[in-house]
Image: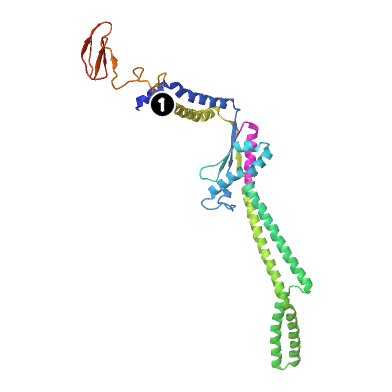
């Protein structure tokens, strides 16, 4: 088929080609016009200190902005945040999910939260609550975790200190490690003094030094076997103290990060405005009209195909025998067709090629060439 054929078909089916898109666009426009007026606003979340800044803990590096955007988008639409916002504002979770849109501003760390609703009074509260709950979900939880770590580390230090105190009471000695070291130093000094006294012939002084050395050795023999257990308790307390110091540093950093994510400082809600019905009509009718045009083309193609299939079936006689296009009745190899040569008593001249016959002043032929004159 050529273009002319397609144009001829389109002109013949113009009612269908134009009617379906018009009906579809009209239905879409009707739905938009009868729908209640929608209102919308945008909340901006700009917290540069949270991404690559001094307070940044979670989002650092070249992909920090994209990571923050992805995390914030997921948090703002998470079931927990949606349920919390619904409890704060009284808006149903289903309406929140259908009306909230979270997007990143370019490649920056700034986020936009858009909300659309037929209830104008609920737009600004929903945006403010969503930004607050999402930031709290991302950063306030870090403070809670860090606080729990500090509490656990403090409990470990207290337990280690209590174990040391209990050991000292049971063994009736305080700080045996220091006593052991001091006794070792004292014995070394006494041995040196005894040597000096023996060298100068001071026997009484040498004997006194010997008694002091023996007393110190007895103390070492008493403390020495117990010292490993005590040193293990000391090491445990030192480890707990180190963990406590690290946990406190983490808590301080988490608090700084939560302060940098304060919703009152990083969130701003724009003015609430009515959604333009003209834009809504265009956005709704244009795609629907295009789909209707495509549907009309498909219907026309189906109708044309059906019409061609019906036209290709040979007609049948009352007895069920196929009827040729030129007249009823079966035809054989010797049958002829009637070819009128003259009408209304005028002399005609016919030319044909093939087999011919003449009956009752009429000329019959099956094809070929013939010249004859007939008349009444």
Splitting the image into 4 quarters, where does residue 40 fall?
top right
Residue shown at the point (51%, 43%) measured from the top left:
106
Camera-nearest residue between 315 and 293? 315
Figure disc tally = 1
Query: What's the magenta bit mostly, secondary-structure-wise?
Result: helix
Classify mark 1: helix, strand or loop.
helix
> Which residue is the site of mark 1?
309
Does the rendering let one see residue 111?
Answer: yes
326 in relation to 194, above or below: above
Residue stretch in magenta: 113-135
Label 1 neighbour load within 10 Å: few <14, some 14-19, many 20+: few
206 in relation to 104, above or below: below
**Is residue 185 toward the left or the right of residue 2 in the image?**
right
Splitting the image into 4 quarters, where does residue 224 fall?
bottom right
Q: Where in the figure is residue 1, as x and y percent of width and height? A: 35, 28
Q: Where in the figure is residue 24, as x and y percent of width and height? A: 51, 26
**Residue 131 forms part of the magenta stretch:** yes
């Amino acid at each position: 088929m050529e273009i002319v054929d397609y144009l001829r078909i389109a002109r013949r089916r113009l009612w269908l080609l134009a009617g379906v898109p018009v009906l579809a666009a009209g239905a879409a426009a009707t739905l938009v016009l009868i729908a209640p007026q929608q209102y919308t606003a945008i909340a901006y979340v700009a917290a540069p200190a949270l991404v690559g800044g001094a307070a940044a803990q979670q989002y650092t590096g070249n992909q920090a902005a994209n990571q923050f955007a992805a995390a914030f988008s997921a948090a703002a639409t998470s079931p927990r945040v949606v349920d919390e916002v619904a409890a704060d504002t009284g808006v149903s979770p289903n309406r929140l999910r259908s009306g909230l849109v979270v997007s990143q501003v370019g490649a920056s760390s700034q986020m936009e939260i858009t909300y659309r609703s037929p209830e104008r009074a609920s737009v600004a509260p929903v945006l403010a609550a969503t930004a607050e709950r999402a930031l709290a979900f991302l950063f306030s939880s870090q403070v809670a975790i860090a606080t729990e770590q500090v509490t656990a580390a403090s409990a470990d230090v207290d337990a280690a200190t209590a174990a040391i105190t209990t050991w000292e009471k049971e063994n009736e000695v305080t700080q045996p490690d220091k006593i052991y070291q001091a006794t070792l130093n004292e014995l070394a000094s006494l041995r040196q003094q005894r040597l000096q006294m023996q060298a100068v012939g001071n026997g009484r002084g040498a004997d006194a030094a010997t008694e002091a050395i023996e007393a110190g050795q007895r103390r070492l023999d008493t403390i020495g076997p117990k010292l490993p257990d005590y040193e293990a308790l000391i090491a445990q307390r030192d480890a707990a103290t180190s963990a406590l110091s690290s946990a406190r540093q983490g808590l301080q950093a988490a608090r700084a990060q939560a302060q940098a994510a304060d919703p009152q400082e990083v969130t701003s809600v724009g003015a609430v405005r009515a959604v333009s019905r003209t834009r809504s009509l265009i956005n709704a009718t244009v795609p629907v009209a295009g789909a209707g045009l495509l549907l009309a083309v498909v219907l026309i193609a189906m109708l044309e195909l059906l019409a061609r299939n019906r036209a290709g079936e040979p007609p049948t006689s009352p007895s069920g025998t196929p009827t040729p296009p030129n007249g009823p009745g079966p035809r054989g190899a010797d049958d002829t067709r009637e070819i009128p040569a003259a009408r209304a008593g005028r002399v005609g001249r016919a030319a044909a090629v093939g087999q011919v016959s003449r009956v009752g002043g009429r000329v019959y032929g099956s094809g070929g060439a013939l010249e004859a004159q007939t008349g009444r």
